[in-house]
Amino acid sequence: MGSRMLTRRLFLASTLALVARPSLALDQSSAKALITQLVGQINIVIDSGQSETGMYLEFEKIFKTFADTSFIAAYAMGADGRRASTSQKQSFSNAFTGYLARRYGARFREFIGGRLEVKNVTKHKRFYEVSTTAYLRGEAPFTVSFHVSDRTGKDLFFNMYIEGVNMLLSERTEIGAMLDRRRGNIDAMIADLQKAG
């Protein structure tokens, strides 16, 4: 009985040690693995034959799984985030994630009949850039790049370039324009964002 208790105790201790162990630092292999998984999920959705609405719901799940949505949302809101309440920030982040899914989901829907392929990884000072190639029917291939970091303690992408267009900068400009149209009213902008994309 004593040896069984000891064995159980050792098993629990080793399990807890594994759970408590910090994740390995981001490297070229893990950055590539993340985007390979992401691309695999995108390819599954574009090949699924689902309705537009169904695809957007799947793309929202993909963003929530693979993207640092809190960072992207905070960057998009920019300086206006400093005057937003905690509840406004949360509402904005939720609305913004759905908006991203619709906006970029619409772009990925253009890939129906095509595919994304992971190509190479480049190390930058604080992140890795994973380049993929989009192959579409009747179009020349083009590059879609993802910037990956482990800022949150988990490997996630925090920016994306499609044909050289920077997602972070584009969305900061877009959200700024939406706020301007609402004369800086954050709640009204969030309401607009819930229908945008």
Image: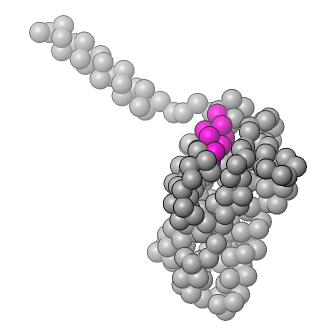
Q: Nearer the viewer, residue 185 or 145?
A: 145
Give how far across and how far down residue 190 sits, in percent. 56, 79
**Dominant SS type (magenta):** helix
Residue 22, placed above or below residue 136: above
Residue 178, placed above or below residue 135: below
From this viewpoint, which residue is outermost toward the bottom? 183
From the viewer's perspective, is 31 left or right of 121? Answer: left
Q: Name which quarter of the figure residue 189 lies in.
A: bottom right
Q: Nearer the viewer, residue 30 or 44?
A: 44
Q: Residue at x 42, y 26 (%)?
A: 18
Q: Residue at x 69, y 89 (%)?
A: 181
Residue 96 lies in the magenta-colored region: no
Residue 75, placed above or below residue 84: above
Residue 34 lies in the magenta-colored region: yes
From the viewer's perspective, is 18 left or right of 112? Answer: left
Give how far across and how far down residue 197 sits, in percent. 64, 72
Give how far across and how far down residue 191 sits, in percent. 54, 82
- Quarter of the figure that contains the N terminus: top left
Q: Name which quarter of the figure residue 193 lies in.
A: bottom right
Give how far across and how far down residue 16 sits, in percent. 36, 28
Residue 72, placed above or below residue 32: below
Q: Is residue 69 visible?
A: yes
Q: Nearer the viewer, residue 48 or 2?
A: 48
Q: Which residues are magenta?
A: 33-43
Q: Residue at x 66, y 37 (%)?
A: 36
What's the colour scheme? Answer: one colour
